DNA sequence: AGTCACCTGATT
DNA sequence: AATCAGGTGACT
């Protein structure tokens, strides 16, 4: 589920439901969710602490704790995090639980077990993150910054947008949607896209992500459920064989970097 | 830059 | 049985 807008929606939800809660215990149901960290170390770092703030950087989530530790989470493909009203009834795919003093519990729900959670001293967090490009919704993500990065790269436009070192937070869906908005062929080397199209792309990245966040917030407003009909209205993603909303040509699907890219072959070039 | 491994479940 | 899935890190 998660690209930047989904992670932002989760951050918002946890800000509402988890901030102020105190952790009495952590139940690690799948040790691989902690990666290399031992369950003992994780438990020691979180036990007895309160959650003071929930933050996001790109697709990474941070739960800052009152004891100067921070829980780092990455949802990868299928992770989800939310607060259960009653810790006695965790979902089947719960990989890790943080039990709160009031009987509620934060659950890290992840069917594919690709997501990761870890607890570290807050000051160590920046060094633990992989290299990340600018945050696209930050006012600092200017046209100049974007064009400087883009002009240096020869990557196909779609792979460029998905590269977290170039611009952080886009994934398979919103990269495709931004390219559609900017009318750019996903296969074209980003550095050879015209300045006018790059300008459109810079705006489209912000526009698509900004529009998707409230959709995701609605879709995930009920912890652990998915509100049908709230999702961002996709123009091309997942719409192979359906008409392009702009020109009515047939949306195509091609492999790129081992994944599917959806685009309109008529109006994206 | 491209491919694979990590995991599991849904769909064809 | 094979393919696909909104991600990324480690390989060649």
Image (tube, coloured by chain):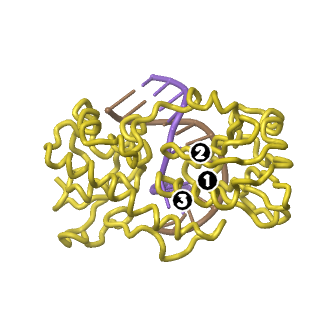
Chain colours: A yellow, B brown, C purple
Q: Are marks 3 and 1 on the same chain?
A: yes
Q: Residue furthest bottom?
A: A229
Marks 2 and 3, the one that precedes in the sequence: 3
Residue at point 26%, 58% (across, down): A180
Numbered disc 2: secondary structure: strand
Is residue A115 placed above or below A87 in the rendered structure?
Answer: above
The answer to whether the residues at label 1 and label 2 have Cβ atoms under 8 Å apart is yes
Q: Nearer the viewer, mark 3 or mark 1?
A: 3
| Relative image position of residue A108 (x, y in whole percent) | 69, 53
For label 1, the crowd category at 10 Å Cα-Cα, with few meaning under 14, some 14 to 19 and many 20 or more, is many
For label 3, the crowd category at 10 Å Cα-Cα, with few meaning under 14, some 14 to 19 and many 20 or more, is many
Q: Are marks 2 and 3 on the same chain?
A: yes
Is residue A169 placed above or below A215 in the rendered structure?
Answer: above
For label 2, the crowd category at 10 Å Cα-Cα, with few meaning under 14, some 14 to 19 and many 20 or more, is many
Task: Pinpoint the chain carrying mark 1.
Answer: A
Residue position marked by numbered label 3 in the rendering: A9
| Relative image position of residue A38 (x, y in whole percent) | 78, 33
Is residue A140 placed above or below A263 in the rendered structure?
Answer: above
The residue closer to the viewer here, A92 or A64, is: A64
| Relative image position of residue A67 (x, y in whole percent) | 76, 37
Residue position marked by numbered label 1 in the rendering: A79
The numbered dot on residue A175 is none
Spatial separation of the CA atoms under disc 1 and disc 2: 8 Å
Relative side of A83 to A236, left or right: right
Relative side of A37 to A145, left or right: right
Relative side of A67 to A129, left or right: right
Residue position marked by numbered label 2 in the rendering: A74
Residue at point 71%, 39% (across, down): A34
Spatial separation of the CA atoms under disc 2 and disc 3: 14 Å
Residue at point 21%, 52% (across, down): A200
The residue closer to the viewer here, A67 or A157, is: A67
């Amino acid at each position: 589920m998660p690209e930047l807008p989904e992670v932002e929606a989760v951050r918002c939800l946890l800000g509402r439901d988890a901030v102020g809660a105190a952790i009495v215990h952590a139940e690690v149901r799948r040790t691989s969710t902690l990666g290399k960290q031992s369950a003992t170390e994780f438990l020691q770092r979180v036990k007895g602490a309160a959650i003071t703030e929930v933050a996001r950087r790109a697709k990474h989530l941070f739960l800052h704790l009152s004891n100067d530790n921070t829980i780092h989470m990455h949802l990868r493909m299928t992770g989800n995090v939310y607060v259960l009203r009653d810790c006695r009834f965790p979902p089947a795919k719960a990989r890790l639980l943080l039990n709160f003093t009031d009987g509620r519990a934060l659950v890290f729900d992840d069917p594919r077990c690709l997501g990761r959670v870890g607890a570290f001293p807050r000051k160590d967090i920046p060094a633990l993150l992989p290299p990340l490009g600018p945050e696209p919704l930050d006012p600092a993500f200017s046209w100049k910054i974007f064009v400087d990065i883009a002009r240096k790269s020869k990557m196909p436009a779609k792979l460029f947008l998905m590269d977290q070192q170039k611009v952080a937070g886009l994934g398979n869906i919103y990269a495709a949607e931004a390219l559609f908005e900017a009318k750019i062929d996903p296969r074209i080397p980003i550095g050879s896209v015209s300045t006018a199209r790059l300008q459109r792309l810079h705006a489209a990245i912000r526009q698509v992500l900004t529009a998707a966040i409230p959709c995701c917030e609605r879709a995930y407003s009920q912890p652990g459920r998915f509100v049908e009909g709230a999702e961002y209205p996709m123009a091309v993603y997942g719409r192979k064989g359906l008409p392009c909303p702009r020109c009515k040509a047939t949306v195509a699907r091609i492999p790129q970097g081992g994944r599917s890219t959806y685009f309109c072959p008529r109006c994206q070039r």
